Amino acid sequence: FGNPIFRQCCDRPKNTNVRISLPAVCFVWQIAMIILFGIFIRYDQESDAHWIEYRKSQNISSDIENDFYFRYPSFQDVHVMIFVGFGFLMTFLKRYSFSAVGFNFLIAAFGLQWALLMQGWFQSLDPMDGKIKISMESLINADFCVASCLIAYGAVLGKLSPVQLMVMTLFGITLYAVEEFIILNLIHARDAGGSMVIHTFGAYYGLSISWMLYRPNLDQSKRLNGSVYHSDVFAMIGTLFLWMFWPSFNSAITDHGDGQHRAAINTYLALASTVLTTVAISSLSQKTGKLDMVHIQNSTLAGGVAVGTAAEFMLMPYGSLIIGFCCGIISTLGYIYITPFMEKYLKIQDTCGIHNLHAMPGVIGGIVGAITAAAASERVYGKEGLINTFDFTGEWKDMVPSRQGGHQAAGLCVALCFGVGGGIIVGCILRIPVWGDAPDDNCFDDELYWELPEEEESIPPILEDNNHMRNRDV
Amino acid sequence: FGNPIFRQCCDRPKNTNVRISLPAVCFVWQIAMIILFGIFIRYDQESDAHWIEYRKSQNISSDIENDFYFRYPSFQDVHVMIFVGFGFLMTFLKRYSFSAVGFNFLIAAFGLQWALLMQGWFQSLDPMDGKIKISMESLINADFCVASCLIAYGAVLGKLSPVQLMVMTLFGITLYAVEEFIILNLIHARDAGGSMVIHTFGAYYGLSISWMLYRPNLDQSKRLNGSVYHSDVFAMIGTLFLWMFWPSFNSAITDHGDGQHRAAINTYLALASTVLTTVAISSLSQKTGKLDMVHIQNSTLAGGVAVGTAAEFMLMPYGSLIIGFCCGIISTLGYIYITPFMEKYLKIQDTCGIHNLHAMPGVIGGIVGAITAAAASERVYGKEGLINTFDFTGEWKDMVPSRQGGHQAAGLCVALCFGVGGGIIVGCILRIPVWGDAPDDNCFDDELYWELPEEEESIPPILEDNNHMRNRDV
Amino acid sequence: FGNPIFRQCCDRPKNTNVRISLPAVCFVWQIAMIILFGIFIRYDQESDAHWIEYRKSQNISSDIENDFYFRYPSFQDVHVMIFVGFGFLMTFLKRYSFSAVGFNFLIAAFGLQWALLMQGWFQSLDPMDGKIKISMESLINADFCVASCLIAYGAVLGKLSPVQLMVMTLFGITLYAVEEFIILNLIHARDAGGSMVIHTFGAYYGLSISWMLYRPNLDQSKRLNGSVYHSDVFAMIGTLFLWMFWPSFNSAITDHGDGQHRAAINTYLALASTVLTTVAISSLSQKTGKLDMVHIQNSTLAGGVAVGTAAEFMLMPYGSLIIGFCCGIISTLGYIYITPFMEKYLKIQDTCGIHNLHAMPGVIGGIVGAITAAAASERVYGKEGLINTFDFTGEWKDMVPSRQGGHQAAGLCVALCFGVGGGIIVGCILRIPVWGDAPDDNCFDDELYWELPEEEESIPPILEDNNHMRNRDV
């Protein structure tokens, strides 16, 4: 890529007009979705009108055993995390809140459709009729898949056009479906909360793209690369909804019964522990012990990421606390030392610090998963519990925990490779100068892609008389 | 109504003091509610302490089959839509956020009580003892009923006093209960998500009221009829909670099992599709391809409205996508062309553009419902599934899908007539100049009905010294 | 405490540097949590991997009967109330939003861990192996316990350092676990929604602390003790999430089946009724009938507090409305008359007015609970329903409703004594001048404990050119 002609071509003056490209991408891709859904996607047995007959034939005693009732509350929580959680977490920039929450909305809405198709082809194609059968669990999986692309969005926040984000999402979902299939089905690793398949993959995918799209003169946009008081409060909405609903995220597709129950408890505890160490390190890092909102908004979530893979295992409550404890420290130190280092020496500009929130905790989560899987025993899980938790059935019925640990580690490597490799390739594609991204001196600015309301400053003169009146009243 | 004396009387200088009328309305109506609840409303079998005996007598195996567990997660989501969703969606105006969220709160809290009574009298009066028996499903229905009045509030936002809103709600709920009874019980139309009974009725009710209360000099309040940066971000909270929880809205009172499951999937897909076409049209409509927040805040929801009636039918996933696709286009075009047209030529001032978000998509939803009902077949639904989905039981056991389609269309007409007719009558009532509404040059202003905090601009001088200190610290 | 040396020592110039103390407290206490969890806390039967074997041995027909599915939706709602509800409710101050939402986050995350231990020791220590077995219900109880400390935070908002808040929480949780054990287990009072154990205790605990820490010169911080327009809108997020999810709060740990169902209905109705009377009194209290945001943000919630104890009883729908009706009036009048009175004559500075929102309604709730329990009859509840609702089993099988009423009243007294007594003692501890609290002239200011972003005012000059451009575009 050092080819000077390619570089030159990429460095032409920027044209941020997306009036042709954005509608074209949205229309064409949405029409493609409709056609592909028409060909491939149908309701599964539990959401089809034949359920009432199926239920009777299978002797299922009550409608409450429809998987809908096991999954729906968790699904809605995950849905909130995707749209409000990720969306608002990124509103912290002073003049990029519209794009944060709006583009997050756009790419998630596209991504989940594409994810239903990609994951369906790989995992739930019915051999009888060649159709993908979807249910609530498919919707949760689609939301999960989208999460990896929203994580990647965090690294490039403020620097990409909406068209680039759509392209990034298209490839991201595709890569995700492949690596997920390899990790979960071929390697048979377990990854309930997606520390590996979602967070590690998503974060390295985003970081690699950001590396490929390095902007040497980004400090010309420094004036906009920061928060104001209210934008930080908006971002806390995102943080809290992510934090509160993370137990649902990690338990959404685990086994019915004790699996979901245990995953929720473990995640709840890990997250609580993270908050305390984040506050501790944040306070230590300042001369007068003041806290930094960036740490509170982000590092408090690291425990949820790291406990993802092992959430359904018998991690024990104290185990969850230990994971949270470590991740709060590592993540906050990451914001203080690693992010500036990466920007300066590795040429990786990471707007939201996803390396600290998703990449490192994701890798830790994968490692913890491998260790706890390898250490699993019948004494702790019970004979049936072990089979149930690790799904040692069918072709994997001879699997043992120690080998499972190896498979988990292999899964982590696959996620890393897909993230870095995929990100580099997609980064190259995104450098082609046709996507309408911002010039270096105008990043982090909603102005480029949004009709903005008048400034508040311009109101007072018009209101003058009114103000007089108001003052008299008071 | 062209009578000059009536007009003259209506056009007297406005007095916005509601110190007598508002407390009087609140107190008297609340006391009336208590008395009527005392006479009429009791717990039903599943929420009464006798449940434990009833359960045993009916051989119900577990408490989990109490309807509470089928409905409660959806109920809470619907509840969030009513109070946070509608409330925050309307906070977009720069100086009307208190009223948007506060009056929404007030009229919803009153409306749901009145709805429990009205719907109870029409639909669940126990012939044995003349009491209305309420359960979780009644609460959901009451929230639905309230939704129609909150939709109407969108049309008149910024122009009515809280007393007028209470009157509008009182009549709105009453009309709703009657048209719902006619449509669902007498005509036997199906309307799971209320495209007809909630959205079409509510929107035309609000638009007719706005038409009757036409303010020729409203542009004197133009300075306040717009957003500022942060108010648009607040409105996105409303948009997203509506968008995310719409699957719960459309599935909240559908059949247990596959009915709820399918309704949630269909709504999820329709909404995703809408987002892409909304973005496309919004971008196309501007010279430089910039997006307009008004479209993103509103039109992205049109798919949820339009899929309401048919959500529980075998619409097929691609069918849902197509509905969403069309509604995103129509709704956004509505904001660009139809709203200005209606204001200029039809004298209908529609503050939130509910014609684009609820009226047109609602009518589309009714039509889609009629078509899909008429096209239903045993091949697709299964014999029992068809009976189950369309409730072809009891006196309707000889119904066939093609006739059901006709009944659906009849239902849509009833909703339209009640909306327009009711709105005109209630609009007349609201023109009587005793309600304390704002003058034309002071609409969209919280100042009239709220004690406002001091302006932010007035802080700096007081903080001067403090600011100095602050600057030294940094 | 009148000892002049003690006073003098307490009145030394304030040093708000918490760089040593805050990290130390967080680290040490979190490590202590890990050790204690390691020794004491394990999964219970429904969250342990042995569940699958247990289920079969107990002949439980389906995984859906795992308590997880009865409790999880309510748990997540309660979780939202704790972190978003309480957190955002307190963001109303113009320059204390970071601390409101951030310290709320910190103390809740610590408190829930400590609560799991304290409540476990008192209530669910397994005599077989000396371990505490936790499940979803334990997590809900921990969140409840935390709620009492967050209520207390409301009284001292803006006046305590984060270290003091941690100390206050440590003791608050400890006291809570003891009083809860006495009230629920020894006295056998029922308190589903915690009117007594949570609200009465928490509020008097906070008020007593505030009394002990009276700041005679607090009016020197008057410039910051108020809201601005947007901070009031943020606070409405808190209000609404508390209001909407209160039915889940009051029903979260009630009996499966009708208990949860009825508690949700009663709370829903009480809250609706409160809104109307709050609006009425708020409007009456101003010369021109304007509403006060403080009342809307707070008093609308009083009905949920007051219906807490009796929510699971056969209160009847109109009974719930009456409770809400009265509490809206009393709470709003409290803001108008009692809070200023308490500040002036009783030397109790109550920043959020928790006396009006939690203390008075909590006491009312306790009294209502006693009366309705005493009035319970087999005619209304049914024989089994009465036993079930009041848990007249085991050693309490000879209990009768009239005596139960007395026990309820005794429970209320215990909650009051623990609140006032505990608050006075903890208040003394917090007066020791080592905790880094703010001086009287700098309260309600995030500046002391947070790195704040630059003021918005400082942006325009930098943006000047950009603004020009923007104006041309529009």
Image (cartoon, coloured by chain):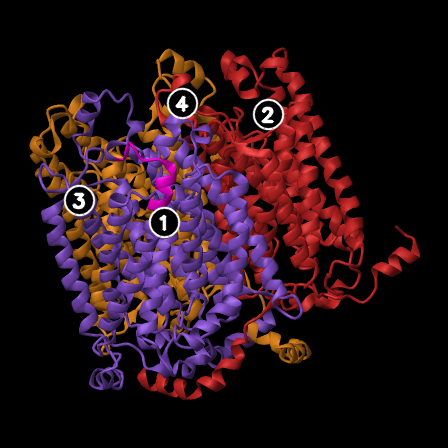
Chain colours: A red, B purple, C orange
Q: Which residue is mark 4?
A: A53
Residue span colored magenta: B396-409
The answer to which of A43 and A174 lies nearer the viewer is A43
Q: Identify the residue at image location x=50%, y=64%.
A: B334
Q: Which residue is mark 3?
A: C413
Whether label 1 touches label 4, CB < 8 Å: no
Mark 3 Cα-neighbour bin, 10 Å: few <14, some 14–19, many ≥20:
some
Mark 1 Cα-neighbour bin, 10 Å: few <14, some 14–19, many ≥20:
many
Which one is in front in this view, the residue at disc 2 or the one at disc 3?
A: 2
Where A446 falls versus A307 (above or below)? below
Q: Farthest residue toward the right?
A: A4
Which one is in front in this view, the residue at disc 2 or the one at disc 1?
A: 1
- Looking at the rendered structure, the secondary structure element under dot 1 is helix
Q: Chain of mark 2?
A: A
The answer to which of A444 and A49 lies nearer the viewer is A49
Q: Identify the residue at image location x=19%, y=42%.
A: B124
Left of B9 or right of it: where is B367?
A: right
Q: Which residue is mark 1?
A: B409
The answer to which of C136 and B202 lies nearer the viewer is B202
The answer to whether dots 1 and 4 both sit on one chain is no
The answer to whether dots 2 and 3 both sit on one chain is no
Q: What distance separates the C-alpha of mark 2 from that of mark 3?
A: 69 Å
Q: What distance separates the C-alpha of mark 1 from that of mark 4?
A: 30 Å
Left of C341 or right of it: where is C377?
A: left
Find residue A247 and name its label: none
Q: Mark 4 is on which residue type?
A: Glu
- Looking at the rendered structure, the secondary structure element under dot 4 is helix
Q: Mark 3 is on which residue type?
A: Cys
Q: Which residue is mark 2?
A: A129
Q: What distance separates the C-alpha of mark 3 from that of mark 4?
A: 58 Å
Q: Is residue B287 magenta?
A: no
